[in-house]
Every structure is written in structure tokens, then in C-alpha cells.
């Protein structure tokens, strides 16, 4: 079996590419980073440090790489059995045109063997979104053929992989936590579901996607933004701060109360899931900067993402949300001159005020029944206390 994987970054090399390669699949990475592409294409292998109680360095072998900007991509798409991505949600629209062109070539070559495409991004139904981008770029006379021969499979992906500095200066070396979970939707495959060790197949994917994104990523983001407020550099140091930990735990519990009601989760198992996540944030073997986890705050404050979607759930089920509101205020208070979205968010707040900026990025209503939305006012109040260093 052959796979083309877009994005030879942390998750690409440290999780999805490794898992596919370990399963005996030949993986070709496609990336815009020419240095990384050249290194993989020359060495055909790279080291992965799996760190935890037992640390081990494993070598991913028999891999290749091409530039995602070259025509080689079309040839690969015409031939492989699986296409995966880990490029970041904002990049999916950019690579969709190449994937569409590759599918045209596959159809013209009359390759009717099943192909499946799986976006491994922190998004709700990221592959379905990717499919929309691809179909926008695909000439209409190919739509029926692609629907017939290509599966677009949504997934949830979980493994903490921060960028790590290699002691030997190896740009391909990657350091990952022991934990990993990749869950895919059984009902969306074209042809038989390939048996890949480490790829779990379920028929209720949304429960798993929301459980992961609205527990781990909700807690992670709030840890990062409060870490920034308290002047802490890493996720580990932030979560070891008692005040931050209490807010993060309670925010995950508030989000969890919604998930338990929505998906009928077992409350005890969900509490254990939260405990496990807190211990993963504390991992002493990973150096994970709050800046990585807090990256792109406008994306993280959007209506379907990890901060606002759980809040909307608390409205639906009339459950507590005090700590989620603190997390949202902390995201608005986040400043980072190296993060384009953090700069843009700060500019919006300066220009229009924090209430208007929040409503713009999150889709929350500015007023309810003719009065200021109390939730927006509460977030603004916490935000101002943070700005005045009085939170
Ligand atoms: N790192 C994690 O802990 C983690 C865990 C789960 C999910 N994710 C998700 O995985 C995705 C990737 O995250 P990451 O941490 O690996 O990011 P990363 O920045 O380490 O990797 C992204 C890679 O995509 C490449 N890229 C950018 N534009 C491209 C293009 N046009 N064509 C091909 N490649 C392109 C970059 O060069 C880079 O190598 C994100 O959606 C993220 O949310 C990350
Ligand atoms: O990748 P992002 O920016 O959506 O989120 C940052 C982190 O929370 C995320 O990368 C986690 O490390 C990952 O989701 C763990 O599975």
C-alpha cells in the first residue's frame, strides 16, 4: 500500500507518517519546506524519540518526500491508495487545487482502485471541509467519478508533538509523547477499510472528535492563555500553577458536562479522561511552549472551535460556564508579536473594543432581547481585570 502525506511537520513525521510507515505502508511526504523535503528524500529515514516513563528512539524507514509545489504531487495522487494531511486547518484550502488536479490525472489514467483521503487536523470534520475545497477546484465533469472512487474520511487525531531541538542538529528528528490516538469514521471509506495498526475505526466519530477537541484542546488553549497571563513559558509550568490548574480542570469539566449530556458519556470515565489529559500536560519530557499551543487565537475563538463551541453547549444544556468564560477572556488578552492572528486580534480590540471584537471573531450576539449580551459583558469584565493585572 502507498500513501501520500501532506505536511512533514511535527504530527506528520511524529505521528501519522510514523504510524503508516510502521504499518508497512510506503509513505511519501509532500511539504513546502525544501530543506525537510531534501533531507527525507536523501536519507529515506528519520528518528522519533518517544518520551515518557520509558524513553525510546525509533527509526522511521523507507520513506520519501517531494515538494508539494511540484508536479510530482499529481503523479503521486494518481497512484497512491491513501492521502493524509497534517498541515494546519488554514492550509487545506491552499493544497485543495493540487489534490483536485491529481484526481483529474487519476481519473484520466483510469485508476479505479479505491483511494481514501483523511485530513488529520484539529478540526470538526476537517476532511469534509477539505472535500468542499477540492470540489470547488475540480472541474464539474469529474465530480461523479471522484464521488464514486474516492472516500473522504473524517478523523480525530491526538498526540502532543511540540517542535523539539535536536541535540545533534538533525532537522528531521522529532520528539513525541507515548500517548497517541487516531480515530476515523468507518462509514466514509471507499472500498474495504484498510487494517492499519493504530488507526481506530468507529461509527460514531463526532462523539470522539468533540470529546478530544472540546476536552484536551479546550484545556490546552486555556492553559496556554493563562500561562501567558501569569508570565509562564511552558505548558508544564502553567499546569503546575495551582490557580491555572483549577481553572483549566473546571473548564474541561464544564465542557465535559455538555459532552456527557450530548453523547451520553459515562461521567466517571470522562473524569478519568480529564485526569489523564492533565497528566499529559505535565509531561516532564516535553518542552511545549504556550506560544505553540495558543497559536492563532482567532481560529481558536471561532464559533466551532474549542472555546466557543463548548460555551454554546452550556447555553443549550443550561450548565455552568464560569471557567470557560475566563478561558475566552484569557484568549482575548493573549499578545504575541510573532503570531499574526494575535496581532490582528489585538488590533480589533483596540479599534472596536473587546465586546465587538469578541462578537466578530466568535459569532456571539452583541445583544440579547435588546440588552447587552450578559455573557459578552462578563468576558469583557474579566478581560479588563486581566489587562489591569487584577485578575
Ligand atoms: N503538534 C501537535 O501536537 C498536534 C496534535 C494533533 C493534531 N495536530 C494538528 O496537526 C496539524 C499540523 O500541526 P503540526 O503541529 O504538525 O504543525 P507543523 O507546523 O509542525 O507542521 C505543518 C507542516 O505543514 C507544512 N506545510 C505548510 N504549508 C504546506 C503546503 N502548502 N503544502 C504542504 N505542506 C505544507 C509545513 O511546512 C510543516 O512542515 C494541525 O492541524 C494541528 O492542529 C497537531
Ligand atoms: O494545533 P492547534 O493549534 O489546533 O492546537 C494546539 C495544541 O492544543 C494541539 O496541537 C495539541 O498538542 C494536540 O491537539 C494534541 O493532540
Image: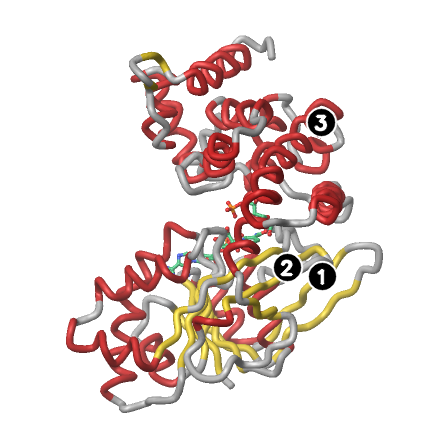
Mark 1 sits on what residue? 49
Depicted 152 relative to depicted 206: above or below: below
Image coordinates of residue 373 in percent, x first then y, are 38, 17
Image coordinates of residue 111 in percent, x first then y, are 32, 89
Determine if residue 286 is in view.
no
Frontmost residue, 260 versus 164? 260
Residue placed at 55% from the left, 14% from the top? 386
Image coordinates of residue 23 in percent, x first then y, are 62, 79
State the mark number for residue 174: 2
Frontmost residue, 109 versus 339? 109
Residue placed at 30% from the left, 17% from the top? 352
State the mark number for residue 246: 3
Q: Are marks 2 and 1 in contact (CB under 8 Å)?
A: yes
Q: Quadrant of residue 98?
A: bottom left
Q: Measure the alpha-carbon separation of dots 1 and 3.
A: 31 Å
- The mark lying in front, picked from 1 and 3, is 3
Amino acid at each position: 500500500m502507498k500513501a501520500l502525506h501532506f505536511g512533514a511537520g511535527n504530527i506528520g513525521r511524529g505521528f501519522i507518517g510514523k504510524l503508516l510507515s510502521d504499518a508497512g505502508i510506503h509513505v511519501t511526504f509532500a511539504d513546502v519546506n525544501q530543506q525537510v523535503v531534501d533531507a527525507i528524500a536523501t536519507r529515506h529515514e528519520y528518528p522519533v524519540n518517544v518520551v515518557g516513563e520509558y524513553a525510546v528512539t525509533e527509526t522511521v524507514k523507507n520513506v520519501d518526500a517531494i515538494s508539494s509545489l511540484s508536479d510530482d504531487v499529481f503523479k503521486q495522487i494518481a497512484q497512491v491508495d491513501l492521502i493524509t494531511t497534517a498541515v494546519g486547518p488554514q492550509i487545506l484550502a491552499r493544497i485543495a487545487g493540487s489534490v483536485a488536479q491529481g484526481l483529474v490525472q487519476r481519473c484520466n489514467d483510469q485508476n479505479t482502485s479505491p483511494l481514501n483521503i483523511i485530513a488529520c487536523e484539529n478540526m470538526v470534520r476537517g476532511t469534509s471541509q477539505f472535500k468542499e475545497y477540492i470540489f470547488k477546484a475540480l472541474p464539474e465533469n469529474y465530480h461523479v467519478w471522484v464521488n464514486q472512487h474516492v472516500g473522504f474520511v473524517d478523523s480525530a487525531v491526538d498526540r502532543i508533538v511540540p517542535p523539539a531541538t535536536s541535540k545533534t542538529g538533525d532537522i528531521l528528528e522529532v520528539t513525541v509523547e507515548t500517548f497517541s490516538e487516531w480515530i476515523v469514521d468507518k462509514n466514509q471509506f471507499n472500498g474495504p477499510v484498510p487494517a492499519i495498526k493504530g488507526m481506530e475505526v468507529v461509527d460514531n466519530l463526532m462523539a470522539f472528535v468533540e470529546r478530544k477537541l472540546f476536552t484536551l484542546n479546550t484545556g490546552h488553549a486555556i492553559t496556554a492563555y493563562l500561562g501567558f497571563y501569569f508570565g509562564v513559558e511552558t505548558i508544564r509550568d502553567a499546569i503546575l500553577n495551582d490557580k491555572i490548574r483549577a481553572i483549566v480542570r473546571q473548564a474541561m469539566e464544564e465542557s465535559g458536562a455538555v459532552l456527557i449530556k450530548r453523547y451520553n458519556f459515562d461521567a466517571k470515565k470522562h473524569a478519568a479522561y480529564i485526569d489523564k489529559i492533565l497528566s499529559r500536560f505535565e509531561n516532564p519530557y516535553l518542552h511545549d511552549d504556550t506560544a505553540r499551543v495558543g497559536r492563532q487565537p482567532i481560529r481558536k475563538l471561532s464559533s466551532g472551535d474549542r472555546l466557543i463551541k463548548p460555551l454554546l453547549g452550556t447555553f443549550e444544556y443550561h450548565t455552568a460556564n464560569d471557567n470557560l468564560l475566563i478561558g475566552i477572556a484569557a484568549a482575548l488578552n493573549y499578545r504575541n508579536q510573532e503570531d499574526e492572528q494575535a496581532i490582528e486580534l489585538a488590533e480589533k480590540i483596540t479599534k472596536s473594543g473587546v465586546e465587538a471584537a469578541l462578537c466578530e471573531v466568535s459569532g456571539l450576539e452583541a445583544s440579547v432581547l435588546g440588552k447587552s449580551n450578559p455573557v459578552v459583558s462578563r468576558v469583557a469584565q474579566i478581560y479588563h481585570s486581566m489587562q489591569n493585572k487584577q485578575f
